[in-house]
Each structure stands twice: as structure tokens, then as C-alpha cells.
Image (tube, rainbow, N blue to C red):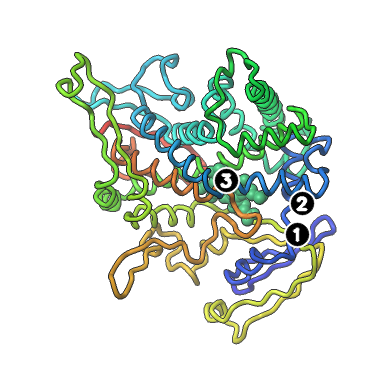
């Protein structure tokens, strides 16, 4: 494949798909594009039927759809959210599986994951479970609690299950397939969306009462731990005169953005590592100064019963001194996310590829393309991430391709260089810094705390990809045996 730009016509609009790294970069930085049509289409699919959030005046639109999400990329959110997430991971990774036989006593993420305790594993507790369901529920729980506070999932324990049902058919809702369409999963997706919107409206209502010093009732006893960007989002909705129900599609768009990519990537990241025992051991060694799990003895605690394991975790150490862990995350993003950035041109633009891109093609000089106001641009990160001109043996999991060594000091660093799995520019992912920190910490804690083994044979069969609205879903779940390492 040698062309860098492909044009197609659909619905009377020209759609230009771009796969050249230099052109993708220059478009993401260009001021001649907007993502508003995509944001508006998504909001409609999320239930903004009357346009309350799409038809805001220019200033209010800017505040609601850019200024508020931008808080997720800045301090103090990054530090506060990282600390909250680390606390939650330290508390909950030891409960990733609890070995409770009764569903009533299991955690929310275990309940839909078909967990079965096994008795034939000697003195180490073990169980079997569906790994994708477990990881998705776990990361969804940690992310949602970090951003929206603990009360929301206590009040609405099925919120995330409904989100997965909606996400399953979201591309169809986004192209306007109606509620009554006789397509499998579509009526269920609309029903799930309605339940989520009702929950988010009740959440906003409760927060505003709590904010005014009024008791929001037993369901939402304390909302102090809601993150600041969420608090500001709800207060802004009120100031704009939006009712809780009219604001709910906006909250749903954020709930969706914060959950669907991270939880899918967390699953692939774990599978890629546990599938390569040599790499897994190297990473365990690399992270060993920064992440530890141990089970306090009865002598240490003085209690007559065994305490659950404890995890210590130094995030700075993981971020600054663990290039293999980080490079494996980037390699997972390269292989298992196929995100796209959608833009519409607000004025004509000429895009020219770099000399470096020409070197990787059979052309002799850089090509320029003129694209016109009103046309749409699809920046296809997934195609680029699997292009053999930039990645040799593109289907092979090889984190070393993201490690660079300083020629003078010999210091190794992980660098994402050409790939853009989080998009970029004004409309790039607002959660990327948080997501990277959370997923590195989660994976590091998991691999010190748990052994995960395939049920059939010594290697996992890495599932095939299933297209989704964000990072790939697995075509099928995988059944695994999970054993405590401490
Ligand atoms: C591995 C995890 C994630 C991946 C791969 C990912 C990827 C993306 C991509 C590709 C976009 C579109 C960017 C563009 O159009 O150029 C996006 C948008 C967005 N993401 Fe993420 N994301 C992840 C996690 C998160 C998290 C955890 C949050 C929230 C804390 C988040 C919040 C957002 C928001 C708010 C947008 C919309 C930006 C806008 O339209 O202005 N994402 N994400």
C-alpha cells in the first residue's frame, strides 16, 4: 500500500483517509479542522435528542466540550487522580479474585465473570474465571470510582454492565440506526442507554443537593470524593440552565470515553505479558524495586487469622525507571487499539508528506494533496500502526521497538515515536496521561500479585480482534486459572 491519502464519497461528503505519519501529525496540529461534527453525532447517539448540549452558543459549547475536558490533562487532576487510583489499586488488586464461592459475597467485577474456586491447587488459593470480563469490570470500577466517586457504583451496580451493552452496538447508534430496528443487540443497547441516562441524571441531582448542603439521601451519602473536573462539569451544567436529564448525555459521553478504551487495553496488555513467560519475568525483575506484594504473617499482625495480601507501589519509579513495562504498554497500544481521529475541514488545506515518509515509499518526491473546506478527514492510526514500512514483522509483539538507548549514557527509555493511539491536537484524548499511569500501575501490581495460566496448554491462545468503537474487543473471552503468588 503506497498511497498516503484515499478519498471516498459517502452521503454527499468526501471522506479523506490519511495514513502517512507526517500528514497525520500536521493535520492534528492544524487549526483548519474541527471535531465538532463527530462530538455532536456521538452526543445524539448518547441521548441528546433535543440538542441541549449540541446547540449551546459558541462560548458555552467551548466551555462544556473543551475547557471542562481539558481539566483532565492538567494539574491538579493528574496528581490527585493518580494518587486515588493507586490507593484503589493497592486496596483492590488483592481482591481481583476473592475466592468467595457465593456470588453475593463476590466483588462487582467477579459477579459477571463466572468465577469458580478450585480445590486442587495445593496450599495456594486458585480459581478459574473469564479473564476479559474480570479485567473490564475491574478497570471500569477503578476508573469510574476515581473520576466519579465511590457512591455511583454503590447506587447503580449495573451501570458498567449497561455501558458494555451500549458500547457493543454504539457504532450502529452513532450512524442513526433507530431503536426499533430489528438488528440483534440494538433494542438492548437503547434500553441500556436509557437506564444509564436515568442513573446519571439522579447522580447529578444528588450532587447538586450535596453541594448545596442538602442531604442527598441514603443512596449517595457522601460525594466529597467526586473528582474536581466532574464537580465542575455538574456545576457548569446547572449554571447553563441544563436539567439533570439534559446534562446526562454529556456525562455519558465522558463515562464512555474514560472506560471503553482503557478496559480493553488493560486486558490485551495482561494477555500479551502472561503469554510470554520470558518477557514477564524480565518485567517482574525490572519493577521489583517499585512494586511489592506480601501477605502479612499472623506474627506480624498479631491477629489469629490470615490477613489479605498487601501491595506497595511507587508510581514514580514505574514511570521513570521501567522502560520495558512502558514499551510493552506502547506495543499493546500499537497492536490492539485501532482508533481513528475524525476531523472536518473548516477551511481549505494543503498537506504535504515529509521526506522521511517518501523514503519509506516508492515515490521519488513528497506528494502534496489539497483538501477542501467541508470535507472530512479520517486519521487512521490503526493502519499506520500495522504498516510494515514503519514496523518490521508488524503482527509480532516486540516491545523492544519502542525502546531507545542513549548512545552516550547507555540509558534506556521507552518512546512512542510514530504512533498516535490517543489521537492528538486540540481534540486528542484528554485521559492519556491518566490512562498510562493507571494501566502501568495496574499491570505491575497484577503481575506481582497473581499468576494467570491458560486452561488449555502452556500458552494462551491470544483471541482475535473484534471491531469496536475504540480499542479492539476480543472475539471471545479466555478462561484462565488465577493463583495468588503470595
Ligand atoms: C488506553 C486508554 C485510552 C485510549 C487508547 C484512548 C484513545 C482516545 C482517542 C483515539 C480519542 C480520540 C482523539 C482524537 O480525535 O484525536 C480519545 C478521546 C477522548 N478520550 Fe481517550 N483514550 C483512553 C483513555 C481515556 C481515559 C481514561 C479518559 C478519561 C479519564 C479519556 C478521555 C477522553 C476524552 C474526554 C476524549 C474526547 C476528546 C475531545 O473530543 O475533545 N480517554 N481517546
Q: Position of residue 165 (x, y in %)?
A: 61, 32
In the figure, is residue 410 to the left or right of 242?
A: left
Dividing the picture into quadrants, the one containing residue 191 is top right
In percent of width and height, residue 297 lies at: 18, 24
Circle on res. 72: 3
The quarter of the picture where residue 330 lies is: bottom left
Closer to viewer: mark 2 or mark 3? 3
User: Which of these two is toward me, 32 or 74?
Assistant: 74
Looking at the image, is mark 1 or mark 2 earlier in the sequence? 2
Marks 1/3 in contact by CB < 8 Å: the verdict is: no
What residue is pinned by disc 1?
344
Label located before the other in sequence (2 or 3): 2
Residue 345 higher or lower than 186, as above or below: below
Please give left or right for residue 456 compared with residue 214 in the image. left
Q: Quadrant of residue 364?
A: bottom right
Residue drawn 42% across the image and 65% down it: 393
Disc 2 target residue: 37
Residue pictured at 56% horizontal, 58% vertical: 382
Q: In front: mark 1 or mark 3?
A: 3
Please report the residue visible at 63 percent of the width from the left and 20 percent of the height from the top: 213
Q: Secondary structure at mark 2?
A: helix
Vertical position of residue 254 compared to residue 360: above or below? above
Viewer-side residue, 132 vs 26: 26
Residue 439, position as x, y percentages in the image? 43, 44
Give yes or no for contact between labels 1 and 2 (Cβ–Cβ under 8 Å). Answer: yes
Query: Circle 1 — which element?
Result: strand
Label 1 to label 2: alpha-carbon separation: 7 Å
Task: Quote the CA–CA distance across marks 2 and 3.
Answer: 22 Å
Where is the C terminus found, in terms of image quarters? top left
Distance (Cα) linking label 1 and label 3: 24 Å
Q: Position of residue 131 (x, y in %)?
A: 42, 35
Q: Is residue 450 left or right of residue 169?
A: left
Amino acid at each position: 500500500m503506497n498511497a498516503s491519502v484515499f478519498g471516498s464519497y459517502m452521503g454527499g461528503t468526501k471522506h479523506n483517509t490519511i495514513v502517512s505519519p507526517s500528514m497525520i501529525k500536521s493535520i492534528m496540529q492544524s487549526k483548519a479542522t474541527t471535531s465538532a461534527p463527530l462530538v455532536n453525532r456521538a452526543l445524539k447517539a448518547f441521548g441528546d435528542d433535543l440538542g441541549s448540549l449540541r446547540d449551546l452558543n459558541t462560548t458555552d459549547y467551548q466551555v462544556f466540550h473543551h475547557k471542562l475536558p481539558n481539566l483532565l490533562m492538567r494539574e491538579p487532576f493528574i496528581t490527585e487522580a493518580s494518587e486515588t487510583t493507586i490507593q484503589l489499586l493497592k486496596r483492590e488488586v488483592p481482591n481481583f479474585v476473592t475466592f468467595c464461592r457465593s456470588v453475593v459475597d463476590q466483588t462487582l467485577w467477579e459477579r459477571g465473570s463466572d468465577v469458580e474456586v478450585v480445590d486442587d491447587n495445593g496450599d495456594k488459593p486458585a480459581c478459574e474465571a473469564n479473564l476479559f470480563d474480570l479485567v473490564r469490570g475491574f478497570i471500569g470500577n477503578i476508573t469510574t470510582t476515581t473520576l466519579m466517586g465511590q457512591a455511583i457504583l454503590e447506587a447503580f451496580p449495573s451501570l458498567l454492565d449497561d455501558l458494555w451493552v451500549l458500547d457493543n452496538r454504539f457504532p450502529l447508534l452513532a450512524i442513526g440506526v433507530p431503536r426499533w430496528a430489528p438488528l440483534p443487540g440494538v433494542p438492548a443497547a437503547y434500553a441500556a442507554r436509557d437506564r444509564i441516562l436515568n442513573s446519571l441524571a439522579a447522580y447529578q441531582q444528588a450532587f447538586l443537593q450535596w453541594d448545596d448542603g442538602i442531604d442527598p439521601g441514603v443512596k449517595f451519602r457522601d460525594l466529597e470524593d467526586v473528582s474536581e473536573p466532574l464537580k465542575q462539569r455538574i456545576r457548569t451544567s446547572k449554571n447553563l440552565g441544563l436539567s439533570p436529564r439534559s446534562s446526562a448525555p454529556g456525562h455519558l459521553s465522558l463515562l464512555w470515553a474514560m472506560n471503553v478504551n482503557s478496559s480493553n487495553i488493560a486486558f490485551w496488555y495482561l494477555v500479551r505479558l502472561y503469554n510470554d513467560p520470558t518477557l514477564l519475568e524480565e518485567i517482574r525483575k525490572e519493577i521489583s524495586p517499585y512494586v511489592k506484594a506480601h501477605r502479612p504473617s499472623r506474627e506480624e499482625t498479631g491477629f489469629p487469622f490470615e490477613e489479605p495480601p498487601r501491595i506497595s507501589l511507587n508510581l514514580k519509579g514505574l514511570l521513570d525507571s521501567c522502560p520495558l513495562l512502558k514499551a510493552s504498554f506502547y506495543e499493546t497500544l500499537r497492536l490492539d487499539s485501532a482508533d481513528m481521529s475524525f476531523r472536518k475541514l473548516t477551511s481549505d488545506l494543503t498537506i504535504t508528506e515529509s521526506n522521511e515518509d517518501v523514503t519509506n515509499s516508492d515515490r521519488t518526491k513528497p506528494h502534496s494533496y489539497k483538501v477542501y473546506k467541508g470535507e472530512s478527514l479520517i486519521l487512521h492510526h490503526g493502519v499506520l500502526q500495522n504498516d510494515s514500512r514503519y514496523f518490521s514483522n508488524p503482527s509480532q509483539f516486540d516491545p523492544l521497538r519502542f525502546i531507545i538507548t542513549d548512545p552516550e549514557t547507555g540509558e534506556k527509555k521507552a518512546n512512542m515515536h510514530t504512533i498516535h493511539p490517543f489521537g492528538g491536537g486540540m481534540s486528542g484524548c484528554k485521559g492519556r496521561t491518566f490512562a498510562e499511569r493507571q494501566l502501568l500501575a495496574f499491570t505491575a501490581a497484577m503481575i506481582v500479585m497473581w499468576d494467570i495460566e491458560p486452561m488449555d496448554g502452556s500458552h494462551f491462545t491470544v483471541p482475535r480482534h473484534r471491531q469496536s468503537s475504540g480499542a479492539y474487543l476480543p472475539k471471545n473471552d479466555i478462561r484462565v486459572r488465577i493463583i495468588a503468588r503470595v
